Amino acid sequence: MNLHKLFKILAAVLGVAGIVFLVRIIATGDDTIKADALMGDTAIIDPIAYVAYIIMALVIGFVLIFVLKNLFTNPKSLKNALIGVGAFVLLALVCYFAFAEGVETPLRDGEVLSEGGSKLVGAGLYMFYFLVFIAGGAMLYSGVKKMINR
């Protein structure tokens, strides 16, 4: 049995299980499910959630396996991936150490965000801004380059 046929069978089994659990949820009704959830009983919803978790784990696992397989069989793509990861880590370090400032911040629920937590949030925001700027610049550069080459 080849791998493609095995994946098709696995997808069919998980699809049928998902449909069965969905029909069960629909047959139970919204009001009953909400009332049961308020009392802490989630037995109707748990099976379809587990099917979703299994599918997500399988997809993530297969993606990681095939990406790593491709990276190790193609040295040029491994080099490019390592350069990209290195640039990402460098940008994260620059954002954390050069731009982010940590200040204790009171929160709405009465808790206090620590100085380190505040610095991490600030670094994340700065990194987001830089990545948006870089992506916008790359799209602009690509568009202008295509217009000039025509």
Image (spheres, grey):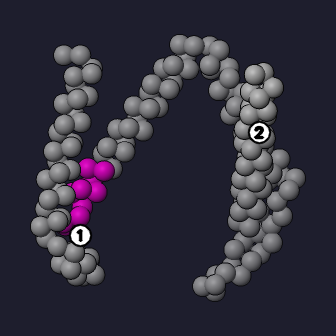
**Which stretch did the figure color magenta?**
42-52
Nearer to us of marks 1 and 2 is: 2
- Where disc 1 sits, the SS reads loop
Q: Residues within 10 Å of mark 2 (few under 14, many from 20)?
A: few
Q: CA distance from mark 1 to mark 2?
A: 49 Å
Q: In terms of depth relative to the viewer, which is nearer, 65 or 131? A: 131
- Classify residue 57 as left or right of residue 78: left
List the residue tagged with mark 2: 140
Q: Which mark is residue 2?
A: none
Residue 116 visible to an observer of this rendering: no
Q: In terms of depth relative to the viewer, which is nearer, 134 or 114? A: 134
List the residue tagged with mark 1: 42
Q: Is residue 45 magenta?
A: yes
Q: Main secondary structure of the magenta part?
A: helix
Q: What's the residue at 62%, 20% (across, down)?
A: 78
On the image, the x and y values in percent for residue 93 come to 79, 46
Q: Is residue 114 magenta?
A: no
- Where disc 2 sits, the SS reads helix
